[in-house]
Amino acid sequence: MLLITAIIWGTAFVAQSEGMRYVEPFTYNAIRTLLGGIVLIPVIAFLKRILSKGSDTEKPATSRKDTVLGGIVCGIVLFAASSFQQCGIPMTTAGKAGFITALYIIMVPLIQVFLYRRTGFRIWCCVLIAAVGFYLLCIHEGFRIEKGDGLVLCGAVFFSVHIMVIAFFNSKNADGMVMSCIQFMTAGILMLICMLLFEHPTLQGIWDAKITILYAGVLSCGVAYTLQILGQRDTDPTVATLLMSLEAVFAALSGWLLLHEALSAKELSGCVLVLIAVIAAQLPHPSEKMTKKKRGKMT
């Protein structure tokens, strides 16, 4: 699930970059986010009907209170993250925006440390390797960072918080699909207010950006963010972030294939290091193999 999420998010950077040619950031985000929430409503209704006709086996009850609260909190954080990201994308390349956003792979373990959650030495090594990869890609001579890079970096901070908030409410047994829908409606309404206050949207501009808005709304929001919530249920937050950080690789590849954005040898080396870190983080630890063998003998 999280790998599919990374692919969709990575390719969505191209759609977001192209969409900004026709509309302003809050307009783009408001429409695509509300669209993502609307798409989920019939999906949730359909799944609930199917599940109600399914097996009679007892399923763990979900918490309505935590689902609603989780959706609202996730929506507020997503609003901040997406707004910073979308404002920064026109000032940088789609590939670089993808890699900078994926810096949450460093931020999430740090947040876990402050929350007194233990992160294994191997995962920390993978995080450091990925950090070197991001350095090769993003930092120019003299440690110069462009304004757009800084805005996208602020978005990455909020995306890190978003991942931790999802992990928290998943532990409270919130309904992932409903929580995802509520977060889109919450974020979309906040973006809509900002759109009306700070921008001057036109129907022609929205129509010209319709393909990119549909892709980002239906797939990036409706599908990918929901898969993120469901996929994080059985995955440690730090490992989940490493896997989802592959969006940076797919963003760079999409920018190269579709927008003809060039990557230097230094930047390509950074891509390779990130890939190595993500793959290494997914490999089972020897102690995990021993545990599985012992369980196999006991059964």
Image (cartoon, rainbow, N blue to C red):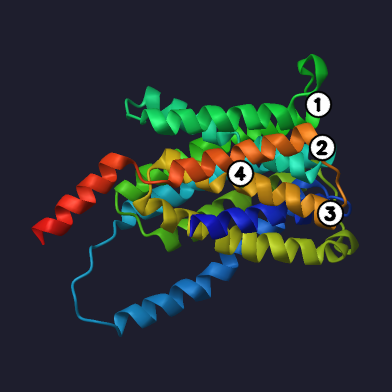
Near mark 3 (Cα within 10 A), the count class, few <14, some 14-19 or many ≥20, is some
Q: Earlier in the sequence, mark 1 or mark 2?
A: 2
Q: x, y percentage for residue 185? A: 56, 56
Identify the disc placed on residue 175: none
Residue denoted by label 3 = 18
Q: Earlier in the sequence, mark 4 or mark 2?
A: 4
Q: x, y percentage for residue 176? A: 41, 58
Q: x, y percentage for residue 57? A: 19, 76
Residue denoted by label 4 = 79
Res. 59 image quadrant: bottom left
Mark 2 residue element: loop
At x 68% / y 40%, what residue is drawn? 271
Residue denoted by label 2 = 92
Near mark 2 (Cα within 10 A), the count class, few <14, some 14-19 or many ≥20, is some
In the depicted view, which residue is nearer to us: 117 or 87?
117
Q: Is residue 153 above or below residue 75?
A: above
Q: Nearer the viewer, mark 4 or mark 2?
A: 2
Looking at the rendered structure, the kind of residue marked 4 is: Phe
At x 56% / y 56%, what residue is drawn? 5
Mark 1 residue element: loop
